[in-house]
Amino acid sequence: MLRATLKDGSLRHTYRHLRRAALCTISSSSTPAHPPHHHQPAHNVTQEASGHRKPLISASEISKFSAMAETWWDSKGPFKPLHMMNPTRISFIRSALCRHFKKDSSCAKPFEGLKFLDVGCGGGLLSEPLARLGAEVVGIDAVEKNIKIASAHALKDPVTASIEYICCTSDNLSSESYGQFDAVISLEVIEHVTEPKAFLDSLSALTKTDGAITLSTINRSLSAYILAIVAAEHLLHWVPKGTHEWSKFITPDELALLMEQAGLKLQEMAGMVFNPISGKWSLSTNTTVNYIAYGTKPVVTTA
C-alpha cells in the first residue's frame, strides 16, 4: 500500500534498498507467502463457475480482519494507510461519478438522490464520506465486528446515522430484497476474495443498468511485492504481516477482463502513488502498485 515517487537520488536509493531487502526476504526461511516469480500463473478469469461455489470471503480472511476491527478509526493503527489514502480515493470517486451522473462536483452534496453500495465497508471509512456527499448509503461486510464498529461510529453524526450497515457478502445481498444501486463501490477488497470472477459478477448484479462501479486494488507486480508486502508489512510494519497475498493481487488487464465478463465497461483507470516526503497520496498514470478504476453497466440493446 506504498508507492514512492522516485524523483531524486535519496528516494532511488531507498527503492534499491527495499528491492535488495525483498530479494533477501524471498530467499530466507521467513519468506512471506507466495513470493513473485515471472512464471506465476495469472488468475483464471475465464473459468466457468462450478455448481458448488466456495464462499467469496474465506474463514481466514474473516478471522484476520476481525482481529483488527477495533482499530478501524485509529488513524495511526493498522488501517493508517487507508486513512491516508482516503482523500485521494474520494476525489477520484467524486470526479468520476459526478461526470457519469451529470452532477455538479462543486456543490456540497453532489450525490443527493443516488443510492450507493459500499462493498467490504470495514469500519465505514468510505461509507461516511459518501453519506456526507449526499448519497443514500448501504454498507456491507462479511465481518460482524466491522459492521458493529461502523454502525456505532456512524451514530455519532446525524448525517451518517442514516447509513444502513449489513453483515453479508455481495453474493448474498444479491439474493435479498435490496434492489439495485446507482453505484457500487468496492475499494481494496477484490484482492481478499476467493473468486474474483464471481465477486465481479455479484457486483454487476447489484448495479443498475446505466449505473456505475468503482474498484481499487493492488497490481500483481514485483514493485507491489516490494512495497505492499516486504516494506509495508515486514519492514515498516504499517499493516500486520499476512494482510496481503501477492498471488491474489489483480493486474489492470485482468481487472478490465473481469469487468467485461461481468457485463461492465471500463471507463477510466488511475494509479495512486504515495510521496514519502509530503506523506500524501495522489492520482497518477502509474498503475504499477495501487490503482483505482471506474466502469459502467451499459444498457443492453436488442436487435
Image (tube, helix red, strand yellow):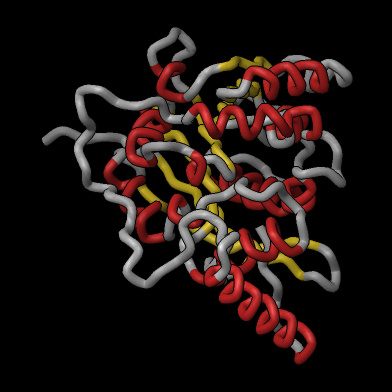
Residue lying at 58% horizontally and 42% vertically, measured from the top left: 187
Q: Quadrant of residue 20?
A: bottom right
Residue lying at 80% horizontally and 70% vertically, measured from the top left: 276
Q: Position of residue 255 (x, y in %)?
A: 39, 52
Left or right of residue 50, residue 102 in this image: right
Q: Quadrant of residue 67?
A: top right
Q: Looking at the picture, does residue 10 appear above or below residue 206?
A: below
The foreground one among 97 and 2 is 2
Q: Report the quarter where the C terminus lies.
A: top left
Q: Report the quarter where the N terminus lies.
A: bottom right
Q: Looking at the picture, does residue 201 appear above or below residue 148?
A: below
Q: Quadrant of residue 163?
A: top right
Left or right of residue 264, residue 52 in this image: left
Residue 133 visible to an observer of this rendering? no
Q: Looking at the picture, does residue 122 appear above or below residue 2?
A: above
Q: Position of residue 268 (x, y in %)?
A: 48, 56
Q: Residue furthest left?
A: 303
Q: Residue furthest top?
A: 177
Q: How many marks?
A: 0
Q: Residue furthest bottom?
A: 9
Left or right of residue 155, residue 178 in this image: left
Residue lying at 57% horizontally and 49% vertically, measured from the top left: 244
Q: Position of residue 275 (x, y in %)?
A: 76, 70
Q: Position of residue 282 (x, y in %)?
A: 71, 63
Residue lying at 45% horizontally and 21% vertically, measured from the top left: 180
The foreground one among 100 and 155 is 155
Residue 154 visible to an observer of this rendering? yes
Q: Looking at the picture, does residue 211 appear above or below residue 180?
A: below
